[in-house]
């Protein structure tokens, strides 16, 4: 069974996310675009994932709780979890290591926390797009300790990607899934970085606006039409 996914979506908790990126709006747009599996990956926070998981149930979507972590080198890494409890525990771990600079919402945007009915229940005071003190080479161990997986984000991007910021894929790299959003760059990336020939490549939207959420064009194969979130994570990190 081929299921359509988009595993890199931002909500209104990300300061760069559009205010319309509420949990129910995201779930509704994903349904309209005929997606089966989505993940919420706000910058350095997972606090809107319970709300999106609740909304997703109403729309028949599988919602993966997650986060887009910013390492101390300002490398973006998508971190996904099977359980909301693990994602929120990782959220606390990351928050302790986030550079604490108060958000200037008139410049960067609001950082809104919502419940499953799109009601505002809080607002994050510290700017979430800042770097953390977590180095890239410790991400795998850190995420794994919370039962999650790591996926280096948008490898083809000229900023905030593993390749742009470190200039290479480190020889001690231990990830088995990576994200390339513009697949026309994939062959070039594989030629220049042979490590990528042995990992699963996924392609997501990195949507900050509702219209940018992916159509149902990228799929993962499963034995049935409703895999568990754990089965989805296991599939993502399995080598092709």
Image: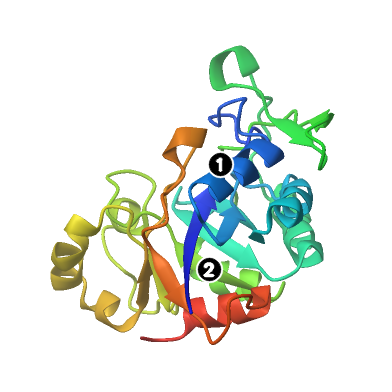
The kind of secondary structure element at disc 2 is strand
Q: Which mark is residue 77?
A: none
Q: Which mark is residue 29?
A: 1
Dot 2 or dot 1: first in sequence order is 1
Does the CB distance between marks 2 and 1 fall below 8 Å? no
State the image coordinates of residue 49 (x, y, percent, origin top left).
72, 51
Q: Nearer the viewer, mark 2 or mark 1?
A: 1
Kindly report the distance in space between the C-alpha atoms of the residues bearing marks 2 and 1: 26 Å
Above or below: residue 58 compared with residue 201: above
State the image coordinates of residue 41 (x, y, percent, origin top left).
59, 50
Q: Is residue 6 at all visible to an observer of this figure? A: yes
Above or below: residue 218 compared with residue 115: below
Above or below: residue 81 compared with residue 235: above
Please identify the quarter of the rendering in which residue 177 is found.
Answer: bottom left
Q: Which mark is residue 150?
A: 2
Q: Is residue 134 at all visible to an observer of this figure? A: no
Q: Which residue appears at 63% of the width and 78% of the height?
A: 227
Above or below: residue 207 compared with residue 220: above
Q: Residue furthest top?
A: 106
Q: Is residue 119 left or right of residue 192?
A: right
Q: Which residue appears at 32% of the width and 57% of the height?
A: 155
Q: Nearer the viewer, residue 101 or 226?
A: 226
Q: Which residue appears at 21% of the width and 64% of the height?
A: 186
Q: Which residue appears at 47% of the width and 63% of the height?
A: 4
Q: Is residue 83 left or right of residue 196?
A: right
State the image coordinates of residue 104 (x, y, percent, origin top left).
63, 18
């Amino acid at each position: 069974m081929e299921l359509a996914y988009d595993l890199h979506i931002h909500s209104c908790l990300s300061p760069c996310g559009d205010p319309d990126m509420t949990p129910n709006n995201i779930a509704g747009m994903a349904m309209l675009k005929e997606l089966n599996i989505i993940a919420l990956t706000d910058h350095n926070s997972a606090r809107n994932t319970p709300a999106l998981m609740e909304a997703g149930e109403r729309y028949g979507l599988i919602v993966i709780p997650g986060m887009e972590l910013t390492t101390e080198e300002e490398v973006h890494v998508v971190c996904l979890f099977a359980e909301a409890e693990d994602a929120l525990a990782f959220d606390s771990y990351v928050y302790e290591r986030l550079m604490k600079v108060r958000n200037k919402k008139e410049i960067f945007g609001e950082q809104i926390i919502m419940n499953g009915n799109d009601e505002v229940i809080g607002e994050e005071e510290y700017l979430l797009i800042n770097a953390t003190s977590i180095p890239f080479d410790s991400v795998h161990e850190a995420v794994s300790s919370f039962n999650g997986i790591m996926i280096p984000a948008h490898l083809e991007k000229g900023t905030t990607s593993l390749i742009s910021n470190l200039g290479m894929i480190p020889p001690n790299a231990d990830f088995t899934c990576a994200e390339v959003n513009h697949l026309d760059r994939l062959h070039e990336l594989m030629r220049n970085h042979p490590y990528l020939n042995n990992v699963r490549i996924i392609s997501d939207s990195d949507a900050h606006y509702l219209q940018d959420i992916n159509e149902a064009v990228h799929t993962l194969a499963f034995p049935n039409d409703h895999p568990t979130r754990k089965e989805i994570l296991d599939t993502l990190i399995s080598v092709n």
